[in-house]
Each structure stands twice: as structure tokens, then as C-alpha cells.
Image (tube, helix red, strand yellow):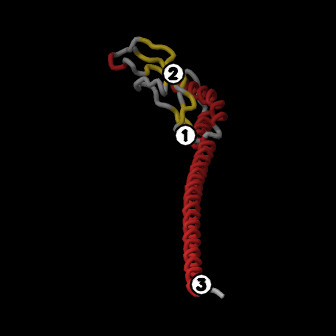
């Protein structure tokens, strides 16, 4: 038979061993919890970055789509600009009295201008303004008729145009020096 003192020691050792096992399990679980929390933090960070990237993509895509819609007719309008130039020259000639600009041609001229303006086309005002390399293309420079016309546009050879505030053709001008 067993000695009661030995049984107590055995139970005590067994209890210590059980407590040590529990402590090891707690430490292991705490380590796993810390590791899982770290992985969760990394996953949240990746998710937030991906979400922000996707949101930026959507905004950029929407902006590009709007820009495309605004300038979709650019090539067509650029092809029509020489016709518009011819109309302007004919109108100036008619106003000078050398040619006749009939009422029908006048109506077509106004209709064409109205349609192009509704599409976002705007002509540049260039005569008498300060020469700006960002807007004007200098064909030549001539002596300025007056001192205040130096560095300014004396004459416009070809009118410049904006399409929805974007330059589609630079004005070709003569500058006073």
C-alpha cells in the first residue's frame, strides 16, 4: 500500500505540473492572439489601401470619361475650322463692301457658329492683347505703329480656338516690336 505522505507529495507535484502546463498553454495562447492581432492589423491595412486605390481609380476613370465626352468632337471641329475661317474672311470682305454676303449665307454662318459654340468652341480674342507664347504663335514681328503696341498682337493671321477651355488651335499672329 501507499504511504499517505507520498500520495500528498504526488498530488502536489501533479498539481504543480498541471499549473505549469496551464501557464504554458496560456503563454502559447497569448502568443497566438498577438500573432493573430498582428495579422488582423496587416489585413486591415491592406484592405484600407486597396479600398483607397480603388476609390482613386473610380475618380480617375470618371474624370477621364468626362474629359473624353467634352473633347469627343475635337477632331471633327478641327476639320471644320478652315471652313469657319473662310466664312469669317467672306464676312469681313462683305462688311468692307467688296462682296455681297447674302441673307441665306448669313443664316448658315450664324447657325454654324451657334452649333459650334453649343459644343464648347470659343474663339480667342487676340488683336491688341499682350503676346502670350502659351496662346499665340508668332508668324512674324513688325515695327509697332505706336509705342504702347510693342509686344502686343498687331494682326491675327489665323484665329485661335478653345474647346471647353482647352486650346485646340493656337492663334497665328503678327507681333509689334
Q: Quadrant of residue 8?
A: bottom right
For the C terminus, the image quarter is: top left
Residue lying furthest left: 147
Q: As displayed, is residue 79 above or below residue 173? A: below
Identify the secondary structure beneath mark 3: helix
| Left or right of 4 in this view: 76 | right
Q: Earlier in the sequence, mark 3 or mark 1?
A: 3
Q: CA distance from mark 2 to mark 1?
A: 20 Å
Residue 170 picture location, percent across and down: 53, 26
Identify the secondary structure beneath mark 1: loop
Identify the secondary structure beneath mark 2: strand
| Left or right of 109 in this view: 147 | left
Residue 141 picture location, percent across and down: 45, 13
Q: Residues within 10 Å of mark 1 (few under 14, many from 20)?
A: some
- Identify residue for label 3: 7
Residue 146 picture location, percent across and down: 34, 16
Q: Earlier in the sequence, mark 2 or mark 3?
A: 3
Residue 54 picture location, percent across and down: 60, 52
- What is the tally of numbered marks visible in this picture? 3
Q: Nearer the viewer, mark 2 or mark 3?
A: 3
Q: As displayed, is residue 57 above or below residue 15? A: above
Q: As displayed, is residue 161 above or below residue 13? A: above
Q: As displayed, is residue 117 above or below residue 97? A: below
Out of 70 and 127, give the one closest to the viewer: 70
- Identify residue for label 2: 137
Q: Contact, CB < 8 Å: mark 3 with mark 1?
A: no
- Identify residue for label 1: 164
Residue at the image position 61 percent from the left and 39 percent from the top: 71
Amino acid at each position: 500500500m501507499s504511504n499517505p505522505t507520498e500520495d500528498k507529495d504526488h498530488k502536489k507535484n501533479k498539481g504543480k505540473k498541471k499549473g505549469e502546463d496551464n501557464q504554458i498553454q496560456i503563454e502559447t495562447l497569448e502568443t497566438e492572439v498577438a500573432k493573430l492581432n498582428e495579422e488582423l492589423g496587416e489585413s486591415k491595412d491592406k484592405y484600407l489601401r486597396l479600398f483607397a486605390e480603388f476609390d482613386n481609380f473610380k475618380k480617375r476613370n470618371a474624370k477621364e470619361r468626362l474629359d473624353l465626352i467634352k473633347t469627343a468632337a475635337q477632331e471633327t471641329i478641327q476639320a471644320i475650322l478652315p471652313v469657319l475661317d473662310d466664312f469669317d474672311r467672306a464676312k469681313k470682305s462683305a462688311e468692307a463692301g467688296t462682296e455681297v454676303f447674302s441673307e441665306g449665307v448669313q443664316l448658315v454662318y450664324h447657325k454654324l457658329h451657334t452649333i459650334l459654340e453649343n459644343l464648347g468652341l470659343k474663339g480667342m480674342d487676340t488683336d491688341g492683347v499682350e503676346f502670350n507664347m502659351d496662346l499665340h504663335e508668332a508668324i512674324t514681328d513688325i515695327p509697332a505703329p505706336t509705342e504702347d503696341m510693342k509686344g502686343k498682337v498687331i494682326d491675327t493671321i489665323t484665329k485661335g480656338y478653345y474647346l471647353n477651355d482647352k486650346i485646340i488651335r493656337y492663334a497665328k499672329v503678327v507681333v509689334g516690336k
